[in-house]
């Protein structure tokens, strides 16, 4: 998928954007437009129309049966929607600058309660996805988009398109690649999962999610710097690639696990790591629901690798899991995110069996490494 | 989690239907149709050639240059 305008066509579109009906959109939607245009969200070519929207909600597939679990939609207020005509083009602006041309195919209303129930499995406003949904406009705009100017990124040097990652993997001679989704700084448990998966494939694509997160999550720059440090010190350069995925976290648990797998397939990953409580939040999802949901998608085109619980075992002298370690609970130190977070928030260095000292040092350089 | 939507019928030999019926006895599939749908989707994923845009040599070289500039390639 390549809907990035180039050359003269791009210049003409930029010019047209000045006199077309305009819609200024926020950061999350602008990143969505860029991701559609660059093929990160392939096979989507635009924001979902009504038929696809309903199909995604109800059967977790597009209307043509292709797996797709998260509705990619462009919401506006009713008042604003009245300004746009179906069948006509709209200029999408981001921070006042022409971002894309949208070919508006349809406008439709939707049921937020149904959206919340089906995508998040709850209508509880304590769920960050539900809270965001409540603030969304009442009307959805569906139609293809053509990118004029990509939104500015703070992390351009880590940003690769699927075209670029596919060339990169080919150049590295990787025939099999495992994708790792993360929104956290790495502890030894993560490294264990990554290296266990890497043992079976040619390379690992570590792909932190950069974008809107909830309060208390690690800041984007901290996650990136922590991973760059880990890879520099503990991975072989020929076998690991770090690049970002700019999109928001939806906290949609199992549905988002499938969504994350599809995006990594688009980057060229043949395998995808699914951990415990993938894309979960609080206790809204069963920790292994994100594993079970893959049973419904034999046609994803990427192989999920499931990981359950892992811990540091004092008697084994290393990271282990329930299948590899015969020792009792007393010997085990769990990778408690809450505990590690608390230590880091106090400026303390977690013990070496939980986090690499180089990684802890990078995090502790930040006065406040957490989203406020 | 998947919901029932619109359906169409296909015809298969009854002997094949019986084999599928036997296969699902000790699985979570609640019908031959559900199992056949799963198998067909699995088979299609292997058969369908993904429509990947092919880069020209010039475009690919430009990508390689960017990857080198960013330090991803030597």
Image (cartoon, grey):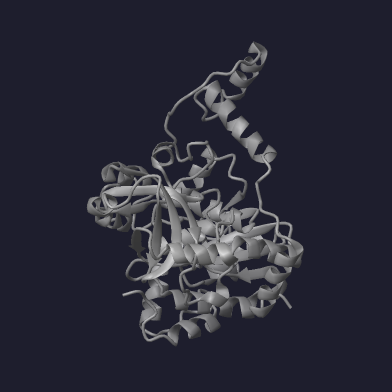
Give the number of marks: 0
Is the C terminus of chain B in the top left, top right, bottom left or bottom right quadrant? bottom right
Residue B17 in sight: yes
Image quarter of the N terminus of chain B: top left
Q: Residue at x 58, y 58 (%)?
A: A326
Q: Position of residue B14 (x, y in %)?
A: 64, 12
| In the foreground, A10 or A93 | A10
Q: Which quadrant of the structure image shows residue B68? A: bottom right
Residue A65 percent location from the top left of the image: 52, 36
- Residue A257 appears left or right of A193: left
Q: Residue at x 46, y 66 (%)?
A: A15
Q: Position of residue A359 (x, y in %)?
A: 52, 80
As drawn, A243 above or below B74 = above
Q: Position of residue A177 (x, y in %)?
A: 67, 59
Is residue A159 or residue A235 the one in the foreground?
Answer: A159
Residue at screen point 39% across, 38% down = A54
- Up-down: is A60 above or below A174? above
Q: Quadrant of residue A277?
A: bottom left
Quarter of the image where one finds residue B40: top right
Q: Is residue A312 visible?
A: no
């Amino acid at each position: 998928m390549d809907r990035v305008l180039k050359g003269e066509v791009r210049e003409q579109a930029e010019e047209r954007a000045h006199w077309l009906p305009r819609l200024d959109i926020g950061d999350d939607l602008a990143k969505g437009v860029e991701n559609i245009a660059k093929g990160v969200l392939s096979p989507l070519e635009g924001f979902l129309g009504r038929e696809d929207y309903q199909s995604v909600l109800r059967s977790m597939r597009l209307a043509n049966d292709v797996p797709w679990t998260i509705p990619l939609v462009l919401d506006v207020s009713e008042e604003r929607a009245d300004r746009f005509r179906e069948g006509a083009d709209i200029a999408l602006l981001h921070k006042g600058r022409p971002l894309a041309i949208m070919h508006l195919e349809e406008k439709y209303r939707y049921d937020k309660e149904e959206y919340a129930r089906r995508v998040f499995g709850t209508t509880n406003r304590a769920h960050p996805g539900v809270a965001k949904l409540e603030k969304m406009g009442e009307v959805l705009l569906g139609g293809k988009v053509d990118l004029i100017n990509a939104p500015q990124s703070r992390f351009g040097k880590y940003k690769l398109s699927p075209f670029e990652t596919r060339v990169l993997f080919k150049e590295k001679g990787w025939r099999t690649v495992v994708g790792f989704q993360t929104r956290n700084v790495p502890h030894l448990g993560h490294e264990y999962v990554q290296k266990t998966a890497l043992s079976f494939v040619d390379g690992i694509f570590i792909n932190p999610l950069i974008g809107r997160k909830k309060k208390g999550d690690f800041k984007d720059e901290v996650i990136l710097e922590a991973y760059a440090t880990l890879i520099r010190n503990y991975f072989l350069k020929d076998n690991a690639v770090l690049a970002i995925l700019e999109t928001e976290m939806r906290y949609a648990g199992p549905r988002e696990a499938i969504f994350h797998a599809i995006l990594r397939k688009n980057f060229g990953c043949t395998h995808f790591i699914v951990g415990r409580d993938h894309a979960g939040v609080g206790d809204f999802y069963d920790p292994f629901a994100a594993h079970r949901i893959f049973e419904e998608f034999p046609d994803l085109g990427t192989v999920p690798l499931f990981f359950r619980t892992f811990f540091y075992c004092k008697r084994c002298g290393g990271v282990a899991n329930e299948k590899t370690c015969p020792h009792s609970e007393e010997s085990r130190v769990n990778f408690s995110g809450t505990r590690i977070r608390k230590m880091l928030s106090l400026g303390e260095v977690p013990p070496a069996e939980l986090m690499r000292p180089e990684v802890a040092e990078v995090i502790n350089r930040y006065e406040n490494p957490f989203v406020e | 989690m998947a919901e029932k939507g619109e359906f169409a019928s296909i015809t298969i030999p009854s002997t094949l239907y019986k084999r599928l019926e036997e296969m699902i006895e000790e699985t979570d599939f609640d019908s031959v149709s559900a199992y056949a749908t799963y198998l067909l989707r699995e088979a299609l994923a292997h058969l369908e050639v993904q429509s990947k845009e092919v880069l020209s040599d010039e475009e690919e070289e430009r990508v390689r240059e960017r990857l080198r500039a960013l330090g991803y390639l030597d």
